[in-house]
Amino acid sequence: MTNYSPREACTQGSMVPPEVPRTIERVVATLRVDSVGSAAFGTSRSYFAKGVQQGKVYRAVGPHHPWQAGSDPAARPAWQRLDAKDTLAEGDVVRAVGLGEFTVEAVLGETRKGRVRVRLRSTRERRPESGAA
């Protein structure tokens, strides 16, 4: 067995390296899942809402990441399907099939016009290249 770096393994067709997480701050109208999800991935709200309606968006229930306080590194989260009207809270981990995953790191407050400023940590899914096996 040959050891490859993650980038080399991708070219060998054995795996796709994960995207590096990025932290972003956005102002959203509400903490509804479609509003926050569209901000996390840079898509339109209607596009993200269509994915929610099709049942492709889930929230992690229970411990998710090993670095979260009090979580067992071997434990896997249960995933709860979200509805478009569900609201998110600080610390929620959301998975959108085909787009990636994001965490609501902090709700930073409200703007003068009543909108909500949030800090998100998102990781986009990487697609294998069309020539990969």
Image (cartoon, grey):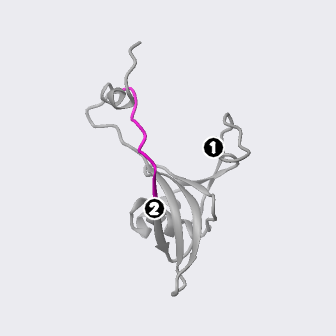
Disc with the residue nearer the chain's start (2 vs 1): 2
Residue depicted at x 66% and y 39%: 76
Q: Could you say which quadrant of the image residue 10 lies in? A: top left
Residue depicted at x 44% and y 69%: 45
> How many labels, in total?
2
Q: Can you identify the residue that label 2 sits on?
A: 24
Q: Give the residue at the far top of this rendering.
A: 1
Residue depicted at x 63% and y 58%: 91
For marks 2 and 1, give the CA distance. 20 Å
> Is 104 left or right of 45, judged from the image as shown?
right
For residue 94, the mark is none
Give the magenta range. 14-23
For residue 67, the mark is 1
From this view, report whether residue 109 is shown above or below residue 44. Answer: below
Q: Is residue 97 magenta?
A: no
Position of residue 30 measured from the top left corner of the image (x, y, whole percent): 55, 75
Residue depicted at x 25% and y 32%: 131
Q: Give the residue at the far bottom of this rendering.
A: 113
Mark 2 belongs to which amino acid? Answer: Ile
| The C terminus lies in quadrant | top left
Secondary element under disc 2, as helix, strand or loop, is strand
Mark 1 belongs to which amino acid? Answer: Trp
